[in-house]
Every structure is written in C-alpha cells, then in structure tokens.
Image: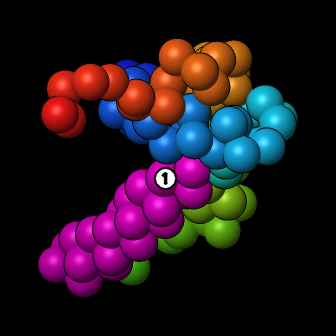
Amino acid sequence: MNIMLVSVTERTREIGIRMAVGARPRDILGQFLIESVLLSLMGGVIGAVLGVASARWVGGLMGSPAVLSPAAVLAALGFAFTVGLFFGGYPAWRASQMAPSSRCGTSDSAN
C-alpha cells in the first residue's frame, strides 16, 4: 500500500494531465488497480517459483522428494491477487479523486 501511495504522490502531474485531457476518475482508478494487482501477482509468481525450486532442492538434498500441492500454489497466487486488489484500492481511489487543475504541475518555477 505504501509503494502505491508513493507512486500516486510522485505521479500527480501525469494523473492531472490525463484528467485534463478527458480521463474519467474510473479510468485513473482502473489504471492504478491494474498496476497494483500486476505488481502483486509478479511478486507472487516469483515467490511461487522460488518456493517450488527450494522445496525440490531441499528434497533432493534430503533424499526424499518434496510433495507440492498445486492447490497451495494457486491459493498463494490468489492471495497475492487479493492483496494487490485490497491494498491498491485506497491509493487508486485517492488518485482518481484528484483535481486536474491542481495536479497539472503548472508552476512558474520553470522561468
């Protein structure tokens, strides 16, 4: 959640420009929710691959094969998806509620 909140904070100019050219709040919400879920799923897939590889490696060292349940791996991926959706929801909502005029990054500091 903190990573997504930082992402929203650092991308206020992008969000403001998108809204100024016609993006609806639900478009912004969808963008950040998809980003959050994909980040969580990528972490889940990496974790599952490392977990399966580690279990097989340790099983080989011990002389007995590790028994891996495909249902457990799918449950872990489902949990990663749920975490991304749940903890990405508030930052995505917050991004969608920004006012385009205050977030376009128009300041006189460039002069």
Residue 108 in the image, given as x and y percentages of width and height: 26, 24
Nearer-the-camera pick, 57 or 44: 44
Nearer-the-camera pick, 100 or 31: 100
Is 67 drawn above or below residue 26 in the view shown?
A: below
What segment carries the magenta color?
Answer: 35-64
Q: In this view, does 74 lie to the left or right of 54?
A: right
Question: Is residue 63 one of those drawn in magenta?
Answer: yes
Count of marks overlaid on the render = 1
Nearer-the-camera pick, 90 or 105: 105
Work out which residue is located at the far front of the displayed protein and give it: 111
Provide the major secondary structure of the magenta segment: helix
Is 23 drawn above or below residue 54 in the view shown?
A: above
Question: Is residue 12 one of those drawn in magenta?
Answer: no
Nearer-the-camera pick, 36 or 7: 7
Determine which residue is flagged by label 1: 39
Residue 79 in the image, given as x and y percentages of width and height: 63, 41
At mark 1, the secondary structure is helix
Where residue 16 sits, quadrant-wise, is top right
Q: Is residue 2 left or right of residue 87?
A: left
Label 1 Cα crowd, 10 Å radius (few <14 / some 14-19 / many 20+): some
Q: In this view, does 12 lie to the left or right of 59?
A: right
Residue plotted at (42% across, 55% down): 43
Residue 71 in the image, given as x and y percentages of width and height: 71, 60
Asked whether the viewer can see residue 34, the reply is: yes
Q: Quadrant of the C terminus?
A: top left
Colour mode of the rendering = rainbow
Q: Is residue 52 left or right of residue 27?
A: left
Asked whether the viewer can see residue 79, the reply is: no
Amino acid identity at mark 1:
Leu
Where residue 97 sits, quadrant-wise, is top right
Residue plotted at (82% across, 36% down): 24
Residue plotted at (19% across, 26% down): 109
